[in-house]
Image (cartoon, rainbow, N blue to C red):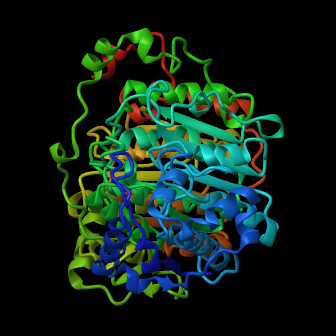
Amino acid sequence: MSGTALLYDEEMTRYKLLWEDPVCKVEVPARLTVSFEALRRAGLEQRCERVCVRQASDEEILLIHSKEYLEAVKQTPYLSLEDLLTFTQQYGDVYFHPNIYHCAKLAIGATLQLVDSVMTGKVRNGMALVRPPGHHSQRSEANGYCVFNNVAIAALYAKKHYNLKRVLIVDWDIHHGQGIQYCFEEDPSVLYFSWHRYEHQDYWPNLPESDYDSVGKGKGTGFNINVPWNKVGMTNSDYLSVFFHVLLPVASEFDPELVLVCAGFDSAIGDPEGHMCASPEIFGHLTHLLMSLSNGRLCAVLEGGYNLTSLSQSVCQTVHTLLGDPTPLLTGIGSPCYSALESVHNVRAAHRMNWSCFNRAAPVIEPSTKRNKVDEGAGEKKEEEGPEQTTEDIEWPEPLPRPAPPAHTVVITSVEPGCQHLEELPQAYTEEAEKIRNQPYQEMTDKVSLKCLQNIVSILEKMKNKEVLNALLVVPDMCVSVSCAVQHALKSISDRVLVVFVGDEDVPVDTSDGRVLLFQICSKEPKGMTSHYHVPLCLSKGGNSRASVLQAVLGLLLPLAYEFSPGLVLEAQGDSAQLEGPVWTQLSSLLQGLAQGRTLALLQPDGDRNMVNATCASLFGSPAPSLSPLGPAPAQDVDAIEAQRHRLQDRWGLLLNTISESRTESQDG
């Protein structure tokens, strides 16, 4: 299963607003055309598998919508302009056109064709560029530019036709998809996550049920997760904080069989609806993080996005990642703002009885997001947050190109399918390896070890020259090899190297100058001083609990790593490593979101052959296997993770997920 589907039909551009409406004027046909043309100019459309778009049937529409509503919409192609306006006015913030019913059926059909392509294995993932959007529409009501609920219909369609038991819907549009929430708030088979501009209920759709304490009803309790943004200007750090501390822990525990993304890019910088400051590049990273779920089965469906520049850039970033291209560099990652942290804190608290990953969450902080404009005073709120910038006020750099490397993965143990074998080494690399060996490792005289160092130097030079993206080496002496790789990487590739080491050995790397971040999963405390750049995490049985390792990776390692922003990721397993193969593969897949995918994996020669194969597949972009069932992490492991988080959070702000009594809004900087 490989490949990325792209669904687009120009027919969906053939409706527009026919009267003056300041609310609806931003929903224009160009939203679709500029997105598709951007994909074509970037060469992405040609690399995708084009799938024909079809119309949805009445039966498919009726999975969500009432027969009365469907029959009413069916009449819109025959209405006069005056009657269309009258029909429109019974709904909120939406408009109708004689062709919109046809386009709405195409939007659903495209979404369902994408689900079929992914679920039958014709492709691994894909994106549907559709219009009208869908996530606001309800059973018998058009709303918020939406006629039919494309993604909600897709979720029920997937459950019905592919017997799915668990579907995850991730709604990163800047508006709350209340239509989807209403559909599934009592359904434990669909986990709905939405972040959205809320501003203490002062922002459209102004619903109390859009707040963090709307967690679902009845059997669906816990399966509705709302993250309210109570101020504008949220950044990449805020978005990553929510993914690491809210969405991904719950999603991993839920273990979806399919991920549907309401891909609304009005949450990107420059959008006149969102007024947020997250760059288009962040959507490439969010997509990568979601691809670690459901064996990589992911369907992204366009929702909002009204700044045509940031919209098209964000669509391209998403499709780049779906195709497996190296993720872009993110700079300036750090602490979430106070308002975002407050929302993260309260969401975790509201769900601590629903998900084991939140069992230790602190109670809700009050007064909290329940504050409203009346309580604070309109003038005070305006002074605190400042006036909203217009779209014209904001500028951002165009995302850098994301070319796929000539060779994706190099492996030296044997020729693996899809991987390049390491050829004869240049003399310069041999001499460099000799220099490294002659410094601290004079006793290393055997040819096998020297050849290993030469291979490491050669691989790193290939990465530097962008001849290869990542590599796997089987090495005879792990600690020496790690030290060699770090030394040469700091000299040749980057001034920041992340080392993720599994095992109890004392890893001979120097973290004192802050250029190396060492994260070690072990079963006993290693010798030597720990620091803000040396993070030994002692887990029971050396990390044999899947839930423990995943909780540590999502809540500790990834926040550290994204804030550190390495130029190379070095992952290694020592002699005492006890990590299970699927856990290691999941770890390896997630780490490839860093350092533009530059990863060097080091394994032992006497290790499990399946581990070598799985690592190769992971480096080459194959989806990581499910870790289900996770179950709760052992209490002692949770304690160890929390102890490290508390120790490090003063230095690494992205680790924050709780508002302490000592932290006030004035400290937010």
Q: Where is residue 145? Give x, y as percent.
A: 48, 54
Do we see residue 649 in this rendering? no
Relative to 314, say whether 424 is above or below: below
Q: Where is residue 349? Give x, y as percent.
A: 63, 25
Relative to 360, say whether 381 is above or below: above
Q: Decide which of 288, 568 is in the foreground and name it.
A: 288
Classify residue 199 by image quadrant: top left
| Quadrant location of the N terminus in the rendered image | bottom right
Q: At 37% across and 40% down in the image, what residue appears?
A: 237
Q: Decide which of 636, 167 is in the foreground and name it.
A: 167
Q: At 50% across and 86% down in the image, what residue appears?
A: 418
Q: How many marks?
A: 0
Q: At 52% across and 64% down in the image, what residue appears?
A: 301
Horizontal relation, residue 355 to residue 527: left or right = right
Q: Where is residue 516? Give x, y as percent.
A: 33, 47
Classify residue 365 by image quadrant: top right
Q: Where is residue 42? Give x, y as percent.
A: 29, 77
Horizontal relation, residue 475 to residue 188: left or right = left
Relative to 512, say whether 42 is above or below: below
Classify residue 641 by image quadrant: top right
Horizontal relation, residue 310 to residue 619: left or right = left
| Quadrant location of the C terminus in the rendered image | top left
Q: At 74% across and 67% down in the image, what residue appears?
A: 157
Do we see residue 367 in this rendering? yes
Horizontal relation, residue 16 to residue 262: left or right = left
